Image (cartoon, rainbow, N blue to C red):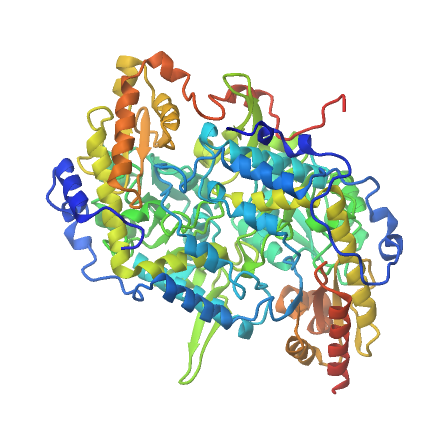
Amino acid sequence: MAYLFNTAKQQRAMLQTIGVDSISDLFNQVPEQLRLKRPLDLPPPLSEIELEAHLRECAGRNVGGSSRACMQGGGVYDHFIPAVVDEIASRGEFYTAYTPYQAEASQGSLQAFFEYQTLICQLTGMDVSNASLYEGGTSVSEAALMAMRATQRREKIVILGSVHPEYREVVETYLSHLDCEIVVVSTPEGTVDLANVEAALDDRTACLIVQQPNFFGCLEDACRLTDIAHRYGALSVVSFDPISLGLLKRPGDFGADIAVAEGQPLGIPMQYGGPFLGILACRQNFVRQMPGRLIGQTIDRNGERCFVLNLQAREQHIRREKATSNICTNQGLLALRATVYLALLGKVGLKEVAELCCRKAHYAAEQLSTIDGVELMFDRPFFKEFSLRIRNGKLDEVLRNARCDGFDLGPTLRHFQSFATQFGKASEEGVLVAVTEKRTRDDIDRLVRSLRKSVLGL
Amino acid sequence: MRNKLATKLLFELSEPGRRGAVFPHSDVPNRSLDELMPPDQLMSDPLELPELSEPEIVRHYDNLSTLNMSVDTHFYPLGSCTMKYNPKRHERLASLAGLADLHPYQVEEDLQGILQILYEMQEMLAEISGLSAVSLQPAAGAHGELTALLVAAAFFRDRGESRSKVLFPSSAHGTNPASAATAGFDCVQLQGNKQGRVDLDELQSHLDGQTAVFMITNPNTLGLFECEIAEICRLMHDVGGLVYVDGANLNAILGITRPGDFGADMMHFNVHKTFTGPHGAGGPGAGPIAVRADLADYLPAPVIAKTQRPTVTRYHLETPQQSIGRIRGFLCNVGILLRGYCYLRTLGAKGLCDVSENAVLNANYLKATLKDVLPVPHGELCMHEFVASAQNLQEERGISAMDIAKRLLDYGFHAPTVYFPLVVPEAMMIEPTETESKETLDAFGDAIHEIVREDAEFLHNAPYHTPISRPNDVQAARKPILRWTRPLNQ
């Protein structure tokens, strides 16, 4: 019996103490007619050796990072994860604990999460960060709901068409039952036209949601977009890439009210889509509208500094249907990974990573655009990711050959239905390319050769 | 001996000029950043982040970790949370190359191994639930509740019905009403009967054409099986409503009875609880949902489908026809589901039954050993957990549930869940799980017996041997300090 160790003799002694004859007597509350009269139809149990062989066999039928250079983007990136991050997140004292309800038994987690909140504030220039949400898409949705509460405007939000299409879909789902209009401002040129944003906003709008850098990799004019939102009394919600803040102005610097992010780039493996880390930070005056857990500093009975779950009156276990969100279990261990990652990189390291990504991405974009029939889809500044247009119906072949040559690019723009209306035919030819600090010049040069070969039909 | 430096904050350990990670020099032409990006978009000041070396970061967090209690180091009978042993093999397997390094936008032909695992996970969860279709997407239990309620809303909308009410017992987890409100429903709370179960008359008095969903935890949060569940489901179905099972307490009934068989229409699983997640200091979890056949078309996008041809089996992602849409970015909390998959493949059908039998045996044994000091107001026998009351101790001796909980920490045991559910005064909700031995349960019972003999005044100040004791929550809430800030003199 896996993971059980009371012997038959001990079980008999226990039953005797309880005062019943058999284990089945313990289940008397379950009516006989509701009992399952057969064993569950599940595969037979595997020993550890067999299980590992099975998992390795399955893993072998995937093509992972060991055999291919990942130059894919779209919100999940192949950044380097220092060994220390894995090592600390593997400590049983962290990963086999739960929500720190008992502060005396959880100072390790509580202090680490207080450090996380501080690091996120330093990174974003915001006043307060919560202790994590599920991932990027739900964070954007929680930010929209939070903005509606904070502004008391419940009829309308505005979101740019350059925000991650999956995140926009999540917002639609979260708001589906509310009488709230979601206005999408399209971005046919790669970034939004400020006049179109101006036209979409009015004094009923709760917030303007911007992604920076946007889904196509391009830099929006987040600063002026924030000003425009504020002019209509709407909150500015900015979804950012945490690595980009090694170089770019922080959401707090240009006046954003709520900053959200997918925290995966901060030391979290891609693992086919999760678990990741939802980051949400805001200005001080919105703190009581925040969703999720907050860790606060206080003193104990002896006057020692310590950390506790704070402002719980916002949360579901206290406020029930009046809570600011239904979230309970969050992404603690991933917040710990991000904390260790940011601590390791620090002031200089994050800047270096951001610069490496930026330089390598620009080198790649420049070299790739020298190929006939390959060009940058948008003539806009970008950070570490860009949209490539591959003309003459060659996209599929180019991507297939690139995979054979050891490179994964993507996602393609046509993977997302909503782009067909924004870009028409061009969406059939667009693909995202992301370049992280892990890629070498040699990788990039080989990718360029691969694409050139495909395009020329060699 | 404790390392006192450990409780300094990262920011207090920081020293200008120090660094942890070092990255290679750029191997591409070194152009000025101002050339590459618009200067007005670039930050003007250096980053605010701290500066630390790798060895001190390791020492800092290794020391901090020792200030935690955890399942690996302590008995952790936190009721409703199923703090069972987390098998180490899962950690290794979930980090294998070919699983941990997959990008969510790779082409399906390069992902057949992981898609097969996730497909099989859907199938196994459907079998365990007795329901027909599964979505792996929800990130945690509360997210599963919200997803299922949105599915229910779409189902009713399609039938031209506008139903506004979600019912739940007063003993429900706080997430139930919070999820119902988030999904746009009105909340109706039922008081329950003297036995601690749903009162059928009360339930009936709330049923009408406005009733959408009844959310029920079974076994309920008092650790009792809702033995009239079949009738409850019938009453709900008679008025056209749906029954949702909060799967937080599934550990009691694996292979014994199935929500689908007793009439439930939807449920969620807490993979981090029942199937050894692990809990990760507060998450990540995974909260997949299962629904009956005619709700399958509404599940969030995408689900994993299988196409079988004579010679080849292919797995792919599919959007259900009437899908409520996306409820998160990317697919699901794959890493946690992988661990759950490993668990189910290790145990098999018989192993899962053994889990529930031993979870229930351990809970009843502990309940029996504590009954002289901590009586349980509801139920002769319990399922996988029980809710004891310290009300007598409070009235006669001035010893509260919180006092006992705090003092237990001194004895080297994590505290039970206290003051929940609200229907029991001075509640102590104790869930030992199946992965604890009789010896551990006896030691815990002995500790409680010793504690209740201790002086009440002494207990009010407990714990005494933990890193801190009785933090001032009132001060924390009155003047919230939610981040470190540099002292003014630095």
- For the image, the number of numbered tags is 0
Q: Quadrant of the C terminus of chain A?
A: bottom right
- Looking at the picture, tell me which residue is in the foreground, B306 or B168: B306
The x, y position of residue A393, in whole percent, is 71, 81
Q: Is residue A181 above or below residue B426?
A: below
**Seen from this angle, which residue lies furthest left?**
A21
The x, y position of residue B253, in whole percent, is 26, 50
The x, y position of residue B391, in whole percent, is 28, 21
- Looking at the picture, tell me which residue is in the foreground, B224 or B441: B441
Residue A21 appears in which quarter of the rendering? Answer: top left
Residue A286 appears in which quarter of the rendering? Answer: top right
Q: Is residue B258 above or below residue B452?
A: below
Q: Residue at x 35, y 35 (%)?
A: B189
Evaluate whether residue B137 shows in this view: no
Q: Is residue B316 left or right of residue B389?
A: right
Q: Quadrant of the N terminus of chain A?
A: bottom left
Evaluate whether residue B64 shows in this view: yes
- Looking at the picture, tell me which residue is in the foreground, B76 or A414: B76
**Seen from this angle, which residue lies furthest front?**
B1
Q: Residue at x 50, y 44 (%)?
A: A91
The x, y position of residue B151, in whole percent, is 44, 55
Q: Is residue A112 left or right of residue A259?
A: left
Q: Is residue B417 above or below residue B212?
A: above
Q: Is residue A389 left or right of residue B436?
A: right
